[in-house]
Amino acid sequence: MTKKIPLDLLIVSATVIATILFVLVPPLNETFIRTLLGLVTVLFLPGYSLTCALFPKKKDLDEIERIALSFGLSIAVTPLLGLILNYTPFGIRLTPILITLCAFTIACTITAHIRRMKVDEKERFNPSFKCKIQMPEKKIDQILTIILICSILASITAVVYVIITPKQGEKFTEFYVLGPGGMAYDYPRNMQTGENTTVILGVVNHEYIQTGYLIQVLWENLTIKQIPIQLDHNQTFERNVTVAPIENGTQKLRFILYKENLTEAYRTLHLIIEVTTEV
């Protein structure tokens, strides 16, 4: 029984490593390859590695079924990992999501290799990498196989088209506030005078042109910070903002986003904080 690592699992591991490099390392993350690897890593590799780990024998599934299941499991697993991350200190951000997804894929790949090595070589799943489709003998099975192949191709085409060529008519700007831990629920609620707290302000430009913004931070009607920024299309801005209340009572911490002419408020967010005197 050979202990050689299967070629398909090597390709999966190499693609995962390449994705990390092309997403996190400049100037690699400014190329089209970043998008291509990202699509493969999100939409196919997690499901494929999990499928290989669950079904190490070639008789378990045929190759078409494996491909379809790989896409289906990837679409199911990726949101679940994101949901889990939301309840961790890391939050839902690019780097934690990327590392978690890649770690999951590598873990499943290692499991798949271990399970395959326990299967007799003649029964072990080993993809041929040939453009050859084994059609079933029964007419109804042939029709279902053709429908499945067409559905997979149509789904891949639709997803790639939506991601690469978004509608330019949908122009907007995201404006959000996160708590100190980078999550959307751990906001400061109670503070004492003189005590500092930190929130994370974020702006994402989906205007399809470079846009100027101004973020204004106010305690009630008192302006305490102004942050001017310039963002290209799809560029994200995040900054930790530290504030400290001055007066007692129920206070409103407001965040106002201005864009373009910087005269009319585009978005307004606020937090209600109960402020007491430090004992």
Image (cartoon, helix red, strand yellow):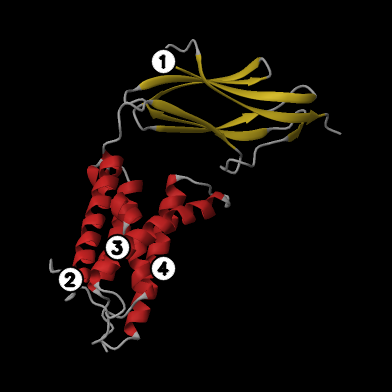
The residue to which callout 4 is attached is: 107
When the figure is inspected, residue 68 is found, relative to residue 164, above or below; the finding is: below
| Viewer-side label of 2, 3 | 2
* Left or right side of 61 for 106: right
* Residue 53 lies in quadrant: bottom left
Q: Is residue 10 visible?
A: no
The residue to which callout 1 is attached is: 260
Q: Which mark is residue 68?
A: 3
- Kind of residue indicated by mark 4: Ala
When the figure is inspected, residue 173 is found, relative to residue 132, above or below; the finding is: above
* Left or right side of 202 for 153: left
The residue to which callout 2 is attached is: 139
Q: CA distance from mark 1 to mark 2?
A: 62 Å
* Left or right side of 224 for 279: right
- Identify the residue shown where x is 29% and y is 46%: 159
> Quick one: 42 or 199, which is closer to the camera?
42
Q: CA distance from mark 2 to mark 3?
A: 20 Å
Query: Cβ–Cβ below 8 Å for labels 4 and 1?
Result: no
Q: Residue 54 location, x and y as percent?
A: 38, 74
Mark toward the start of the polypeptide (2 vs 3): 3
- Kind of residue indicated by mark 1: Glu
When the figure is inspected, residue 177 is found, relative to residue 89, above or below; the finding is: above
Q: CA distance from mark 1 to mark 3?
A: 46 Å
| Viewer-side label of 4, 2 | 2
Mark toward the start of the polypeptide (4 vs 2): 4
